[in-house]
Amino acid sequence: MFTLTWTAVVLLSGPSGTTVRLFSLEKGGVKWEKPLHSTAGAHLTTPVHLGTDVDFTDDGSSVVILSDGRRITKLAMTDGKLEWSIEAPGAG
Amino acid sequence: MEYRGARSGVSPTTFDLQECELTCSDTVLFKQILISAEVVHTLALTSSFESTTLTTLSFDLRTSRPLGDFTQIPSWIPNPSQAALAQANGEGAAKVVWYEHGRIRAAYISAAGALGSTKDMVAGKAKLFKEIVNTQARRRGLILGANQYGGVHVVDVNQGKAIDEFENSVRAASIGPRGLC
C-alpha cells in the first residue's frame, strides 16, 4: 500500500503493514524506514490491505499509520521518530 | 472499555509519548483512520456471529488520548469495502459513510467522538446504488456511489447530495490540485 503527499510517498509493506518507508518524491530515495510491529505476530486479513491506512496532519509534520488492524502509530515526517503508538488487543 | 497504560502505574492522563493499550471485549478490526483538525478518527468493523457492524473511536492527535468510548453505529455491513470515513464540516468532525440495502447512509461523528445524526445520502432515491467506491476523495468529504447501470455519482457527504455524475471509469477517479478528475 502506498500513499502520496506533495513531497513524499509513504509505503507500507509486509503482512498487515509491518514496515513503513518514506520515499522522497523528488529524488526517489528512502528517507527513513521504521518497523511498526513484528511479522510473526501479524494478523492476516482478506483483502490484504484491510486494516492498513495512512493519513497526514494538516501541517504535514506527522504521519499517522494504521497497521495490523489494531495498531495506530504517529511518526514525524522528517525522520520517522515515534511520537506515540497505541494498540487495541480486541482486534483480530 | 478498559483503558490502561502498557507500563504499570501509568495514569491514563499522563501517557504522552508512552506506549499504551486499549482493550475491549468485542472482535474489532480497525479499517481506516482520518485526521480532522486535532482529532484522529478510526473506523472499525465489529464482527459477531451474525453480522458485521461499524464502530468508531476517536483520539487526540497530540497525545493519543481516547476521546470517549467505542461508539456503535446502527449499521449492517455486507462487505468491509462498503464503509468509509470521510471529512465532515466542522472543526475535528468526521462522517462515517456506508452502503446498506441499496442506499448510502452517513453518520456524523463530532470532534469529541460522539455519534450524531444518521441519515440517507441522496434522499428520496432509495436503492439507487450498487456499491460505494473508496478513493482518497473521502478525505475531502466526497465519496463515489456506483449505480447498477454503470453510472457513478460523486456524493458530497456534507451536503448529502450528488454533485456530479459520470459513466464508468470509476476506478480512475481521484482528487488532484484542481479538484476531482
Image: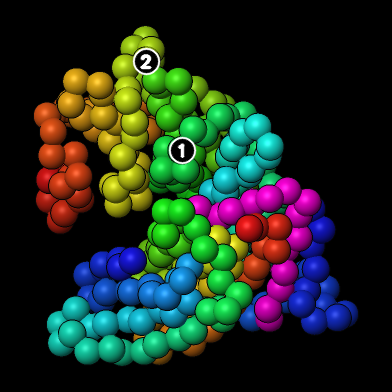
* On screen, residue B164 above or below B28: above
| Residue B1, percent from left and from top | 79, 53
- Tell which residue pokes out farthest to the top in this image: B124
Residue range in magenta is B18-39
What label sits on residue B132 in the rendered view? Answer: none
| Residue B126, percent from left and from top | 38, 12
Say which amino acid is labelled 1.
Asn
Q: Which residue is mark 1?
A: B79
Q: Nearer the viewer, residue B179 or B5?
A: B5
User: In whole angstroms, how far apart are the C-alphas of marks 2 and 1?
Assistant: 17 Å
Q: Secondary structure at mark 1?
A: loop
* On screen, residue A30 above or below A67: below
Residue B122 visible: yes
Q: Are marks 2 and 1 on the same chain?
A: yes
What label sits on residue B127 in the rendered view? Answer: 2
Chain letter of the residue carrying label 1: B
Splitting the image into 4 quarters, where does residue B88 fall? Answer: top left
Tell whether A35 sits left or right of B144. right
| Residue A27, percent from left and from top | 15, 87
| Residue A18, percent from left and from top | 48, 76
* On screen, residue B16 above or below B139: below
Say which amino acid is labelled 2.
Lys
Chain letter of the residue carrying label 2: B
